[in-house]
Amino acid sequence: MPIAIREIIAVAVYTAIVVLMAWLAVFLPVDLCVGDNSRLRKPSTAALCGFLSAFAIVAVVFGYIAWFEIIQHGFLEGVWRTLDKSALPYALGTCATGTVAALVRACMNKQQPRIKP
């Protein structure tokens, strides 16, 4: 299998894992615990929370990866080696995905008419 196809598959798998983790960690608890009239359901607040939750997931993944480099090479060298792997676009893409997903989710909730029993 060519390297480009393996990289595309790896990015797709990691993206699916991050999206699943974001759904389980953010959207499902929000749907179960946050009321419809809450301030957290406003699009701007939801977008900020989506960014922060995606950033937290990325930070945990990078921290886990950096830990092995830190053990092997020391703190500064380990952090530098982890950040030097051209992963910034993937991290920013994940944060943008979390932001847009939360914003769209909040906007979709505002457009749906509520049926009162």
Image: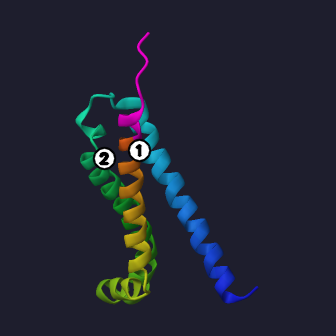
Residue 105 or residue 49, whichever sits in front: 105
Residue 54 sits above or below residue 86 on the image: above
Q: Is residue 60 visible?
A: no
- Proximity of marks 1 and 2: CB atoms separated by less than 8 Å: yes
x, y (%) of residue 105? Answer: 41, 44
x, y (%) of residue 84? Answer: 39, 88
Say whether residue 47 is left or right of residue 63.
left
**Rendered image: mark on residue 62:** none
Residue 18 sits above or below residue 4 on the image: above
Please report the residue visible at 42 percent of the width from the left and 53 percent of the height from the top: 101
x, y (%) of residue 19? Answer: 51, 56
Amino acid carrying mark 2 in the image: Ala
Please report the residue visible at 34 percent of the width from the left and 86 percent of the height from the top: 74
Report the predominant secondary structure element of the magenta stretch. Answer: loop
User: Which residue matches tag 2?
Assistant: 46
Magenta includes 97? no
Q: Secondary structure at mark 1?
A: helix
Amino acid carrying mark 1 in the image: Arg
x, y (%) of residue 22? Answer: 46, 52
Q: Which span of residues is magenta-colored?
A: 108-117
**Rendered image: mark on residue 105:** 1
Q: Quadrant of the C terminus?
A: top left
Residue 108 or residue 45, whichever sits in front: 108
The picture quadrant where one finds residue 9 is: bottom right
